[in-house]
Image: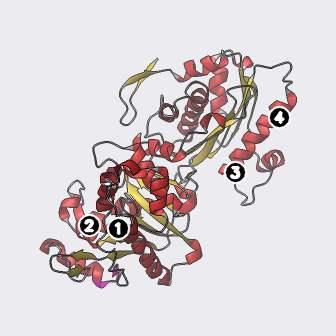
Amino acid sequence: MAITLKGDREISSVPTTKSKALKINLNKDIYGSFAEIGAGQETARNFFRSGAASGTIAKAMSAYDKDFSDAIYGEEEDKRYVTQSRLHKMLVHEINLIEDRLSREKHPDKLFFSYANTVTTIDFAKKFKGHGWVGIRFQLDPLEGYNEIVLHLRFKETNARLQQETLGVLGVNLLYGAYYLNDNPKELVKSFYDNLNNYQLEIDMVNFSGPRFMYVDNRLMSLQLLKNGMTNAVMFGPDGNNLLPAQVLYKKNILALRGSFRPVTKVNMDMYEQSKKLFFKENKVDEKKTQIIFEITLSNLTSEGKINERDFLDRAELLCSLGQNVMITSFQHYFKLVEYFNEFTKERMGLTMGVQNLIQIFDEKYYRNFSGGILEAFGKLFYKDLKVYTYPYHDQKSDTYINSENLKVHPRTKELYNFFKDNGKVIDIKDFDKRTLDIFSRTVLKMIIDGKKGWEEMLPEGIADTIKQKNLFGYSRSRIRK
């Protein structure tokens, strides 16, 4: 047994990589193949070295040559090899071979699996550290359909041999978790880092599918990656399936809206519509190559002390119903979010925010924990081709609309603010809807919980119906006040 500490996990005893592999090898029913491309055959090697592998490994192969790989699995439309599509073809092809070559009459109790990975390790110049796709297709009952777990990783180590060894340990963890932790997907996700550390790799996407995972919400699994410190950002689409941020954002114009969306209101959607219009007017923005992101920070999800998973799923349900891509990040500071986007694109970006958030950005207290302070933050925030679209705030006492022209910034940062404002980095959303400006999510949420009437008209079309039909945010017909 080994002692391990991963992120916010408590110190606990977990099986070693060798003992995990041996336990699988000694299970007479688990039987399958290994297909590994790009980083040796490290996962299969762990099973061979642990002993008793002959009862588990049907085949171990590595089709390194591209032409040979294409001859086996077929050619990808984009001519790439380290892709989710290639991984899926590998998993399906290998499991079909097992089904074709082994008689079910002779092996009625065998639980077939195919494990595959397609990765690229660090390049010779050490400029790109590498990444890869890893997955398993497996049975838990001979008469049942296949389940799948697919994940994407990004290497952090700067040595190819170490990356190969890390991949081998991860592969064992995935295979072990598939067979012995499948009844607890949250623990299964945690187990990916058994005998590993987050300085070795990042896992930024995972998807579960199949009969045993019918009731697994992949958005919740995505949240587990973030919660466990395995990545800094996760993304899912309108269908609820997790997306790979690097793939969605690659070489795209990006417009991001940060909010609590608890629930999403008419104000949120007006901010979205108006900032989108302004963003598309920019001469460097191609509407067809633009990705719009609704972003929620992890700190927002933990605003009440701990993450409320039901509350998270309620927010996700509404944003997905509006056809939006949602990103959850650990970036409390906007410049960290922009830094993250810069990993995938050099195209123009935009941030949409309320004027109160803009005031916070220019508050020196916001950057006390950074050695370079506010100058470091702004150097990273506005270094690239970024525009900030600000939505006004209505001061009801004075009946004044606060925007970038009349907001009060601390005297010490006033000149810095004016510099970016005068250079066109901060743009006011002027064509806003005054009728909805005084709507606040927290007010709507309280009305829903308290059973008050009238909150429905504060939300975009169809959202109130979704809340009622699915009893989101504590909605209950029995509590409605007459």
**Mark 1 and mark 2 residues within 8 Å of each other at the beta carbon:** yes
Amino acid type, callout 3: Ser
Which quarter of the figure has residue 297? bottom left
Q: According to the image, label 2 marks what residue?
A: 361
Residues at circles 2 and 3 in contact by the CB criterion of under 8 Å: no
- Disc 4 to disc 3: CB gap under 8 Å: no
Q: Is residue 122 above or below residue 147?
A: below
10 Å crowding of disc 4: few (<14), some (14-19), many (20+): few
Lower position in the chain sequence, tag 2 or tag 3: 3
Q: Amino acid at mark 1?
A: Leu
Q: Is residue 44 magenta?
A: no
* Residue 284 visible in the picture: yes
Q: Residue at x 15, y 76 (%)?
A: 397
Where disc 3 sits, the SS reads helix
Above or below 350: residue 372: above
In this rendering, the answer to whether 471 lies above or below 33 is below
Q: Could you say where residue 326 lies in the image, as x and y percent from the top left?
A: 48, 58
Is 211 or 15 nearer to us in this picture? 211
Residue 106 appears at what percent x and percent y?
Answer: 85, 18
Give the residue number, with chain letter if any, for mark 1.
381
Quarter of the image with the C terminus in it: bottom left
Q: How is colour applied across the structure in the image?
A: secondary structure
Please name whichever residue, 86 or 81, is drawn nearer the observer in this view of the structure. Answer: 86
* Separation (CA) of disc 1 from disc 2: 10 Å
Figure quadrant of residue 349? bottom left
Q: Which mark is residue 327?
A: none
Closer to the chain start, of discs 2 and 4, is: 4
Residue named by callout 4:
97
Residue carrying label 3: 85
